[in-house]
Image (tube, rainbow, N blue to C red):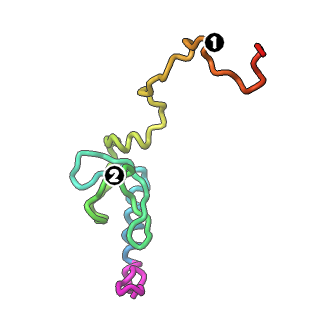
């Protein structure tokens, strides 16, 4: 028992080893760089390793979308390109072209520019 009246994964004989075997097999399935598909969904996700039961590392969608509980059989490798918009945003390193310009830098009049630190104005 874990001291709270329940069983931790390390307290049940064989459970920790079984979880380790499942996690190891799941990681191996994605070792070739496969992406991830959840059940029969048409969306392909990028893969990230997350902490699973017993502290084991498991492949999961990088966007952290829910996978109906912690069912390791819900996700499976997919060699297709990532189509999940959230995953694509997380994995894209390109500078976005959607950033709006606050103001045009070349249109600020010199007389309206912020003064420098005290004592540095030439007019004094």
Q: Residue at x 57, y 14 (%)?
A: 108
Judge depth for marks 2 and 1 and give the one in front: 1
- Tag of residue 83: none
Question: What is the secondary structure assignment of the residue under circle 1?
Answer: helix
Q: Which residues are magenta?
A: 1-17
Instruction: Say whether disc 2 or disc 1 marks the residue closer to the N-terminus.
Output: 2
Name the dominant secondary structure of the magenta segment.
loop
Is 98 above or below relative to 67? Answer: above
Disc ID at residue 110: 1
Q: Position of residue 48 (x, y in %)?
A: 42, 54
Secondary structure category for the residue under label 2: strand
Q: Position of residue 88 (x, y in %)?
A: 38, 40
Where, by quadrant of the figure, is residue 124 drawn? top right
Membership of 4 in magenta stretch: yes
Image point 42% across, 87% down: which residue?
A: 3
**Numbered circle sitting on residue 36:** 2
């Amino acid at each position: 028992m874990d001291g709270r009246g329940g069983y931790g994964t390390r307290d049940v004989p064989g459970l920790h080893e079984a979880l380790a075997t499942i996690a190891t097999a799941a990681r191996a399935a994605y070792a070739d760089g496969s992406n991830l598909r959840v059940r029969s969904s048409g969306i392909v996700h990028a893969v990230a390793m997350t902490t699973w039961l017993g502290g084991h590392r498991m492949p999961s969608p990088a966007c952290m979308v829910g996978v109906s509980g912690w069912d390791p059989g819900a996700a499976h490798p997919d060699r297709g390109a990532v189509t999940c918009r959230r995953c694509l945003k997380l994995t894209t390193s390109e500078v976005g072209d959607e950033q709006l310009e606050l103001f045009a830098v070349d249109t600020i009049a010199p007389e309206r520019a912020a003064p420098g630190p005290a004592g540095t104005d030439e007019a004094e």
